[in-house]
């Protein structure tokens, strides 16, 4: 069994959500961890675990970040991390994978299906293998108790319910 650990200096965990229906706000988690266990370098049937510290959320707006950390959204004090554990990692054509797993946000666990693209393996400066992945998907924030919303005077919603995920992961071989 081969193990891989995420290199946070060369990885990003981002999300996008509609604001006022017409624009998109992008944010990220600055503190996260991930591991992969695979039988070989093809990563078929790999086991993936991921976590992010909810208190590390960053949308480049301190007031919004404070609100996102509050009980209206992530309740970071009570639920300090979100977690993902894969159940299936199925290889598709052209280096793509379908990843099925359980994600837990704010104490609520739901099964999700995410898309993963395997970018290949290279040797790093320390002569260890490095594997690159791009993971995308979509969650309904209401499924995880992130219910806060208000209506504008014109009848539109302030925050969309769909959240797009974008994870760029550089995984380093563990020896």
Image: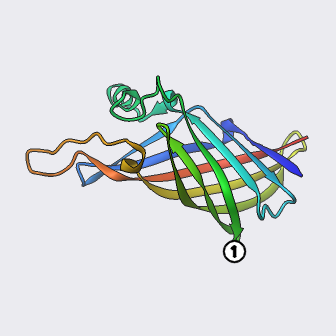
Residue 148 in the image: above or below residue 164: above
Q: Which residue is mark 1?
A: 94
| The C terminus - image quarter | top right
Task: Point out the residue furthest to the bottom here.
Answer: 93
Instruction: Specify whether 14 is left or right of 148.
Output: right
Instruction: Specify whether 89 is left or right of 71.
Output: right
Q: Residue at x 54, y 56 (%)?
A: 111
Residue 163 drawn at (x, y percent): 41, 51
Q: Residue at x 59, y 31 (%)?
A: 31
Residue 164 drawn at (x, y percent): 44, 54
Quarter where residue 34 is shown? top right
Color scheme of the displayed model = rainbow
Residue 59 in the image: above or below residue 110: above
Instruction: Specify whether 57 is left or right of 135.
Output: left
Mark 1 Cα-neighbour bin, 10 Å: few <14, some 14–19, many ≥20: few
Residue 43 drawn at (x, y percent): 78, 61
Q: Residue at x 39, y 29 (%)?
A: 65
Secondary structure under the numbered disc 1 in the rendered image: loop
Q: Residue at x 37, y 35 (%)?
A: 73
Residue 81 drawn at (x, y percent): 55, 33
């Amino acid at each position: 069994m081969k193990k891989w650990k995420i290199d946070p200096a060369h990885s990003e965990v981002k999300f996008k959500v509609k604001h006022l229906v017409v624009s998109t706000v992008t944010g990220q988690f600055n503190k996260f961890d991930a591991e992969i266990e695979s039988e070989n370098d093809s990563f078929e049937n790999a086991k993936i675990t991921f976590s992010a510290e909810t208190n590390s959320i960053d949308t480049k707006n301190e007031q919004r970040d404070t609100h996102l950390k509050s009980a209206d959204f992530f309740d970071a004090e009570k639920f300090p991390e979100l977690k993902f554990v894969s159940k299936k990692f199925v290889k598709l054509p052209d280096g793509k994978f379908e990843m099925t797993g359980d994600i837990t946000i704010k104490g609520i666990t739901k099964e999700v299906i995410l898309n993963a693209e395997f970018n290949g393996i290279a040797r790093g400066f320390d002569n260890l293998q490095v594997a690159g992945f791009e993971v995308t998907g979509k969650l309904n924030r209401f499924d995880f108790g992130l219910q806060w919303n208000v209506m504008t005077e014109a009848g539109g919603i302030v925050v969309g319910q769909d959240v797009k995920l974008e994870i760029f992961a550089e995984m380093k071989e563990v020896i």
